[in-house]
Each structure stands twice: as structure tokens, then as C-alpha cells.
Image (cartoon, rainbow, N blue to C red):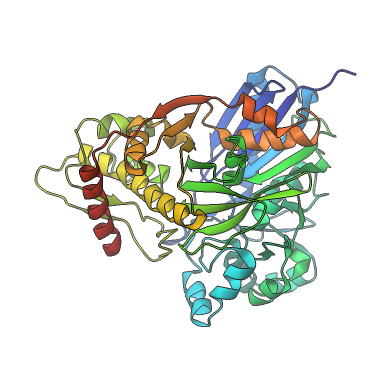
Amino acid sequence: MPRKKHVVAIDQGTTGTTVLVIDDRMRIKGRAAREFRQIFPEPGQVEHDLKDIWRSTIVTLGKALKDAGIKGTDVAAIGITNQRETTALWDRASGEQVMNAIVWQDRRTASRCRELQEEGKNPEVRRTTGLLLDPYFSGTKLEWMLRHVRGAAKRAEAGDLAFGTIDTYLVWRLTAGRVHVTDVTNASRTLLMNLRKRKWDRKMLSLFEVPEAVLPKIRSSSEVYGETRGVRGLPDGIPVAGIAGDQQAALFGQACFEPGEAKCTYGTGAFLLMNIGERPKASRHGLLTTVAWELDGKVSYAFEGSAFIAGAVVQWLRDGLKLFKRAADVEALAGSVPDDGGVVFVPALAGLGAPHWRPDARGLITGLHRGTTAGHLARAAINGVALEIHDLAKAMAKDARRPIAKLKVDGGASSNDLMMQFQADLLGVPVIRSKVVETTALGAAFLAGLATGVWDDPNEIRRAWKAGGSFEPAMKAAERDEHLLRWKAAVEKA
């Protein structure tokens, strides 16, 4: 029987689902994407309906296979990458969600996080999990669900409910409810996993009042977790064989396999990760320590810094202010002026993440004057994202005790040349854009393919990686310093 040569990657993101079909020569043969509803019950709250997520997954699977010109019987494996901290809770018997999933951007547990901080819990949480008490993570979201949905706590304790990040939910659906697992990268984002032992931590479960019966099993990032069953458009028996949270998957897809190598993904948010090797290290500058991946029994860790709003600020300019019709139009509008005209845009539309960790911060625009135009607002918005990443990179260099020598970039917003040039100018190092900007999906495909023999060695991935553009720093130091001074003053007011 001939060896199957195609791997399907499901990239389930915050605003939509993308599916890639990749052949054994690491070429993208098929692609499909579909957006789904964003639900905003109250200010600061963001939810997703799991039915919308599953529907978008099934539709894009079918379209991607059609685009590739192959059938489901030609698929060797499925890899999954996902929006990470988004928290889902569903009934094991019926598969129905207990309530909408609470999205990673959601801020409803900010007061609970402050309460725990005031009780002095943050040092232990940080020491155990590598994270800190912030509504960004899954732990307080799950606690909120169990407290606020009538009967949920008792049903969870009895084992009638299943919790998971979105990877867990997709594996559960793909295997007809037979497999309830997560991988170590997603588990490391919950506030519930011991970072060194890579197991659910009893003290953390007690702190957030989470019963162990509701939790999935923690597995590596590259192994066969189960096989498809009853999935429309796919035969039964396809191995589901790779899982990684979206940012870890992008780090893997960018072939950042050595300590010190770093990448930034510009999606809905922007996420900077640096490989720090086989042992976790504590950050002293507001970063997170997270699992990068577990492969063949070996674990790699990473420092991570998160800017909660990146591409989402462009969506806001499009949908909220109606400055343009398509997100791609922002670059032309921003390029209609020579610079930002002294305008500073702090894109804290969902609070500030690392290294500030201010969940109550809000977006801010300063430096407006009679000569300010829509072009200046657009330019300041994309500059604001790059300035956030500059802060993260400087904190990361201090923690790692080594500068970032070059920054690999990917994600939809990395196609914005103005933003990438400004990023290189701020950092003072080359910014190198991957030829394939969908490295998140590539990482998931690679992990699944390594588990099923489509590829034998990660070095094959390194050899196949190609740059699609490079941006060299060109800004004078005085001009850069002026940008940074205005930015620092604006952030303090946000």
C-alpha cells in the first residue's frame, strides 16, 4: 500500500479557522479559511460558541481538501494548533457546551485575579506554573464557569463535564468523544499545570476549585492521540497526531530549535517567543515561562511576551472608525503620510500584557492636533504594535542575558512592510519574514507528520524553511529615542 503523503493542519484561531493541506515535501497544496462570530456580552467580555468553531472547522476541512485536489483517504495525519487560553466546558454525554467558551481576551475575572494577588498568591502561582495571576489564562475562567453556571461544579466533580482549551475540544469532536486530551503547551497556559513536572498541580487545582475529574490528560506535542470517527468528509481512522498552542506551533514552524532563536507572530494579538532550552527559567522582567514543545521525550521551554492587540487594532480602525473597507488597506492609508505626525496610539483595547500586566489599562491616542489625518491615526496604530514588541524584546534580552540577534516574523500583519520596517528600526536588528506566513499551521503539520513518519527529523524542517523578505534597521538613534520617549509617556497614561 503506497505511503500517504499529505498532512492536514487545523489552525483554529481567535477570529476564524484556517486549514492547510501540506505534502511530504512541505509544500502547501490546499488552503481554506472561514471567520466566525465574536460574541461580546458586556464590555471586557468575549465569547465563542463552540458550534460556530466546529462548523468553521468542518467547512474549511472540506474546502482545503478540495483546493488540494485530494480526498480524505489521502491524508496521513491531522495536526491541530489553536487559540490557547480560551476556555470551553461541555457535557460529556451530549457534547453540548455548558456555556459559550470564554475567550483569552476576556477580562471578566480581573477582580478575582486582584483578590488572589492581594492574598499573596502570585509568587506561588508564578513559581509553580511560570505564569502569573491575570484574567488572560484559563484557570480563573474555568473557576468562573463552575461558580456561575448552576450545577456546573457538582457535575464537574462527578465527571459529567469536560474542560478543555480549543485543541481539546477539537480532538474530542474529531474522535467522536473518545479522546479527552490536551498537549503540554496548552496545559502550560491554564494556571493549573506544574511547569517542571508537566502534570496537573494539586495546589493549583485547590486554589481555583477545579476538580481533577473535569481535566483532560496531558500528552506530548507529537504523538497519535486518537483517530477520526464520524467526521463529515473524512474517513474513519486518520491519526490525530500533533497538537501545539498557536504561538508554540509558530516557534516550531519557524524552525527556532536552538536556544536564543526567537520569533514574533502578528495575528489578532502579537506574541514574541524565544527558545530557552531544556530547563525552565524564571523571568524577572514580566515575561512568562512556557513549554515550547515536547517531542520524542525531550522538552523545550520558551520565554513569551504577549501584546493582546495587534491585527485587532486594524479591525477596529476598519469596523469601529470606518477608516477603510479592507484590513489590507491600512498600509496604504498609513503610507499616505511620511510619519505618525507626533501621534502615539497605545493599542490597549483589551488591557496591557507583558511586561506591564495591567488588565484595566485602556487604549489611548495622544498627540492629536489640527493637522492630524486618518493617515496619521493608521500610522500611529501600526507603530503602536511595533512599540509593544520592542518593550517585550528588551525585557526578553534582559531575562535571557543575550540580545535577540534577528527576529523571525509571521502572521497576517507581518505582511505589512511599513510595520516590519519600523519594527527593525526600533529593535536595531534584522527582521526576517517567513516565506510562508502561516507558520502556526505549518508547525502543527510538522508535529503531526513527525509522529506518523511523514518526516523523520526536525532538521528536515530547518532545511526547508525559507525567508520571504528581510528588513534592515535604518532609523537614526535620535529619532528612535524620540519615538520611545513619547511611547513611554503614553503607556503610563493608558
> Is 129 on the left-hand or right-hand side of 214?
left
Residue at horizontal 69 percent and vertical 62 percent from the top: 196
Q: Is residue 67 visible?
A: yes
- 254 vs 293: above or below: above
> Is 460 on the left-hand or right-hand side of 420?
right
Rendering quarter of residue 285: bottom left
Residue nearest the viewer, comparing 481 with 352: 481
Quarter the N terminus occupies: top right
Residue nearest the viewer, comparing 445 with 30: 445
Q: Position of residue 329 (x, y in %)?
A: 33, 30
Extreme residue toward the left, this view: 370
Residue at horizontal 41 percent and vertical 34 percent from the top: 430
Quarter the C terminus occupies: bottom left
Q: Position of residue 274 (x, y in %)?
A: 54, 47
- 104 vs 231: above or below: below
- 51 vs 407: above or below: below
Extreme residue toward the right, this view: 1
Rendering quarter of residue 322: top left
Q: Is residue 494 visible?
A: no
Q: Position of residue 453 (x, y in %)?
A: 81, 30
Extreme residue toward the bottom, this view: 119
Residue nearest the viewer, comparing 110 with 148: 110
- 327 vs 197: above or below: above
How many numbered dots are placed on residues in this image? 0
Q: Position of residue 331 (x, y in %)?
A: 31, 32
> Is 418 on the left-hand or right-hand side of 280?
left
